Every structure is written in C-alpha cells, then in structure tokens.
Image (tube, rainbow, N blue to C red):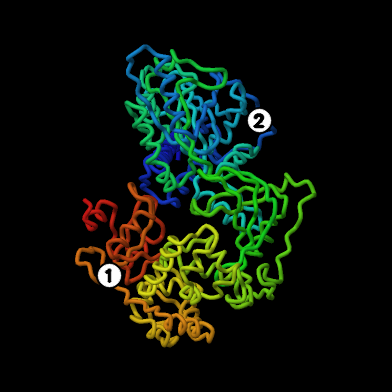
Amino acid sequence: MTMDDLKREAESLRVEIERHNRLYYLDAAPEISDREYDRLLARLTEIEAEHPELVVEDSPTRRVGGAPLAQFETVVHAAPMLSIDNTYSFDEVREWDARVRRGLNAGEVVRYVVELKVDGVAVSVRYEKGRFVLGATRGDGERGDDVSANLRTVREIPLTLKGEAPEILEVRGEVYMTNAELARLNAIRKEAGEKPFENPRNSTAGSLKLLDPRLCAQRRLRFIGHGLGEHRGVHEASFFDVLKRVEALGLPVSPHVARYDSIDEVIEHARAWETRRNTLDYQTDGLVVKVDDLGQRNRLGARSKSPRWAIAFKYEAEQAITKVTKITVQVGKSGKLTPVAELEPVRLAGTTVKRATLHNADEIRRKDVREGDTVVVQKAGEIIPQVVRVEVEARTGAEVAFEFPDRCPSCEAPVVRDEGEVDYRCSNKPSACSKQLERRLRQYAHRDSLDIEGLGDKLVDQLVTSNLVRSIPDLYRLETATLADLERMGEKSAENLTTALEQSKRKTLDRLINGLAIRHVGVRTSEVLATRFRTLGELRNATLAELEAVPEIGAVVAASVHEFFQDPDHQRLLDELTALGVDPQPYTPVAATSADLPFLGKTFVLTGTLPKRTRDEAETLIKSLGGKVTGSVSKSTSFVLAGADPGSKLEKARNLGVTILDEPEFERLAGEA
C-alpha cells in the first residue's frame, strides 16, 4: 500500500470514527457495535504509529490520552466565567423576574430560556477556525486550569467543528459522569479491592485533575454545552438560536431546553421537572433560567461575580452535612432493633431532619459511624433519611465508637440474631416489651390496617404507659369513661374512639392480617392471603404447603405466616379477639368485581426511561388497571414496557417472544391515548 493510500485510509477512518461518535453520543442512534468501533480505532492507531507523519492534531486517537502531564498550566479566561445566583424559592424567582423587567424599558417583551442544571464540573472549550485548541476549568472565574489533554478524551467534545465554523468559538458547559458509568467504575474498583467513588460529581472533578489523560479516558466522561464565552462570527440575537447553532456545529446541548413568554410558565416547568429529573441517567440539582434576548442581556449587565440576566432555581438538597450527636436503638413491632443516628437538625429535601436510620449493626461497622461524627445524610427514596457516609477527615479524636446492645433497651431481655439474618431482635414477647407493644398497636390502628380513627401514637403511648392496654384485645375492653379521664381526651373524643373500635371489628380480612404485624407481611401480601383464604378460620388452619402454593407468596413468607398462626400466644390472642366480637369480613379484590380493567391478569416488566412517566407512575397505573408488575422477564410475562436505554430485559423479552410496548402503545392499551 502506497503512502497516498495510507493517507486516504487514515482520513477516511477519522471521518468514519467521528461520525460514529456523533451517532452514539449526540444522536443516541449507534449504527455499529462497540467491538466494531474499537476495530476502526485500532486500525487508525496502527497507521499513525507506523507513520507519525500522518498524525493530525484532531485525530480521534488523541482521545485515548497522551503522555502524563507534569502539572496543569494556568489559563486566563478571555471572558470571565461568572457564577449564577441561586434560590430555592419560587417567590424569589418572581422577584428576579421583576428586577429584570425593571432593568429594561417599560412594556418590553421578555422571553426566558430554561435548562436543566447538570451537576458536574464547569469548563470552557475553545475553537479557533473550527479546531479545538483549549479546554479549561472555571477555577476562580478569572483563571482556571488548562485541562485540554483530559477534555480531548471526552468523545462528545468534537476536535473539529462541523459546517461553517466561527473564527473563534468558546463554549461553556458542564463535564459530568452518568450514573451508569459510576456504577460501572465502582464495580471494577470493588473487584480490585479499591474504595468505590462516592458520587458522579466528585468522580468527574477527580477525573479532570488526573495528570495522566489515559486514566481520564477510561472514565467515559460526558459534556453538555450551555453558554458562550469569547466568540467571533456568532450573529444570532437569541440565546435559544445560539444553542441550535452550537448543536449544528457538533457540540451537545441539553435536549430538555425550553423557551417561555412568562415567569409563571417557567415555574410550572420547574415543578414538572422536580420528580421527572430523577428518571435521567445523570444528576441534576435544579434549573437555570436565562433571558433569551442577547441584546437585553447586554443592557442588564452583570455584578462582579454573577450576571443579572440569569438565575438558578435549585431543588431542596437531597444530601446534606450534619453531626451525629448520639446513636440510639429503636425497637420495632416484631422486636427488630434498629440503630438511629440522632442529628444536629439540618434542612434536607424540603424538611428539617433530626434523625436518620443506620439500618443495622453491620451497617454501623461498615460505615464506621461514631457519636460525634460529621456525616452526609440523604433521603432514601426521598422519604426516609439515612447516613450515606462519614467525613473521616473532619474527625477530632473525640468521637465515640458505638457498641450494639446485648439487651433490649425497652425491656432488658437478651438480644438474639437468627442464623442468616442481619438484624438483632428482642427475645421477649410483645406483651412483655412495651416498645414492641406500642409499635404493634400503632400498626393495628394504622389506616392500612383497621383504620381506627382517634387511636394515634401519643394515645397509644399513654395507654401502654398507664397499663390500660397490655395486648391488642385490651383495646376492645376500653370503656368511654376510662378514656375520657386520659390527658387531652374528653368525653366526646372518648365516645368517638369507642365507636371507631366497634366499627373496626367488621373490617375486611386483609386489613386484620396487615394489622397483626406478621413478619414479612405487608399490605399487598395481606390482600393476596385474604383472596386465597376467605375467612380468618381458613387462614389459621392453612398448612405450610397450602401457604407456599399461593401465588406471590414465597417460602420465607409462607414459613413466617405459618409460624405466626401456630404460635400458642398468637392463637390465644386471636381467640380473645373473636370472643370480643372481632369478625373480619371477606376481602373482595377490586379486580374481581370490575369489568373495565384492561390489564386484568396481565404481568408487566419495565425497563429503560419512559418519555412521559417515571417507573413508579407507570407501575401505579398498571396496578390500578388490574395488572401486576414484576422485576424479571419470563415466559409468563405478558408485556415488557420499554423506554430509552433499556437493559438486558429487552433482549430476553425478544428471545422469549414477549410483546414489547413503547409508551404510546402502552397508553393505547390503558385507554389513555
């Protein structure tokens, strides 16, 4: 092969590789496999290694990283990289809108562009005559680090712009790591015995600081553009149009950008994204609102550190830093001991958090949580606060390690731990352990159980403390006069409670089952059991084999239910309830009586990100229409509902011949189209 042939092949390979980069990273429409892509890159690398004279500055081979750097050079930004003022309040967003309008001529039309605030690292990428020449971090806004070698490894950042490029184009944006990539890296690190990365943002920042670009290339960082620095040859008057131009040149911008004519529309947009953002494969912590008209921006100007024409609306923090003042242990309804971190109060996801679960003794040891530690807390599933990690560097030496108790903190009974279990439990009977009894009474009165109005937590505590109630049946022995004498009760409240207790005697069987606090049994399992066993007597007499044969009831749950009803103490409790008039009525599932449930008897599996719904929303709709949702695909699966970036479940469904639905098809079946 002649040198001209090799030169033509190398040029062709560069064009082809960059085309596949755009298809994969920008268009999400890859045409070839990773293996085929690697073959193309390997061939180009081979040619350039054998003929260095054919290497060009913007070759895709430069993305794999060059020799390690001695240090990062300092870069002075041609135009300052300003930070943006932020707020957590819609009222303050409205106030900002009012300031913008005051800063312009009366009656001027103001339009706003809204972008997702990607939680990554701010960088600037500079092109001269269409070629990438510099990449830098924000630094202090005036000066940053030259991280060009590392940014070259980010395949979404083109080394040469498409089409007619401006003479100078400096695009500001965010380098970030996807959740999937963090999981991939942590799996590798775990296998190698290395400490896993904590979160995508810190991993991204650490990757850009690596002096060896080859290591950065292994991290698969991503980039999204959201603004301009210095530029010559960009003539658009609208920022929305600027983003379109930037995208046309080959740089990625957010696919979720919107433009609105009023601040009310902006706020509705922000509300809509509060939960929707959790369906994305990357972290976001809010939205950025910007004046669209670039001429209006110039007139509004900037303060020393931030522009007047932009504001960031941030959602309440899902993580926060605070201190553990003490570690206590809670006793649950089944005797389970749960350690809890008592915290210095901290604002988290819209509420003030004072306590966080530590799950179990093993978790405390694994995270090495001590009294006095500085910790990061978050809301698991946006509901239950939990400790994510300890900030070990903040330790002073005064922290105290926690010893898990060997006796129940409520009744002093020995603590036991069943083989194969992670949890410790109080060995005492519920009737002899006041905390167990309190939790069981609360469970019995809960709205998902017997729904006894007026029997709240504080009253339950009073009843147990005063020894008026020593077991669930004692609730039905309470008299109005006795209740009326209790603190904060009164005669009317006492009468209402006794009426509610009387009404609870004939609630449906599923509610009674849930109220009995059987281990491993919740609302759904209670409904399944009450559907199969129509009366309390049938359920009490069910054999282990009969329980195991019930759909959705596994061996562990079946054993727990069987053990509960065979226990002599529980048998006496149920006999007492029956003698006191408790007569649960048959449970009739909604699906058994409704004729308009299109998903009745159908089993769904969900995979990927849906355009309009979260998985929870789709699952709720399926169940409300009589369907069932499971986690794995099998021959009995009726449908797989697939969104963007589906996992291996999609391939398995194809192999098994299971019907695959996209969201529009799903909506038609659900009657929503």
Q: Which residue is mark 2?
A: 72
Which residue is found at the position 38% from the left and 73% from the top? Answer: 510
Horizontally, residue 391 falls left or right of residue 125, namely right
The N terminus, quarter of image: top left
| Tag 2 secondary structure | loop
Separation of disc 1 and disc 2 at Cα? 62 Å
Q: Nearer the viewer, residue 471 or 390?
A: 471
Amino acid type, mark 1: Gly
Q: Residue 102, how many percent across, how many down?
A: 41, 15
Q: Nearer the viewer, residue 94 or 177?
A: 94
Are discs 1 and 2 less than 8 Å apart at CB?
no
Horizontally, residue 474 falls left or right of residue 620, namely right
Amino acid type, mark 2: Phe
Q: Which label sits in the foreground, 1 or 2?
A: 1
Q: How many marks?
A: 2
Label 1: few (<14), some (14–19) or many (≥20) C-alpha neighbours in 10 Å: few
* Image-quadrant location for residue 110: top left
Q: Residue 38, how many percent across, how many down?
A: 47, 48
| Tag 1 secondary structure | loop
> Would you place residue 59 above or below residue 567 in this image?
above
> Can you see residue 102?
yes
* Image-quadrant location for residue 299: top left
The first of marks 1 and 2 along the sequence is: 2
Which residue is found at the position 32% from the left and 26% from the top? Answer: 261
Q: Which residue is mark 1?
A: 601
Q: Residue 639, how many percent across, how many down?
A: 30, 63
Q: Residue 406, how many percent across, how many down?
A: 71, 71
> Would you place residue 320 above or below residue 585 in this image?
above
Label 2: few (<14), some (14–19) or many (≥20) C-alpha neighbours in 10 Å: some
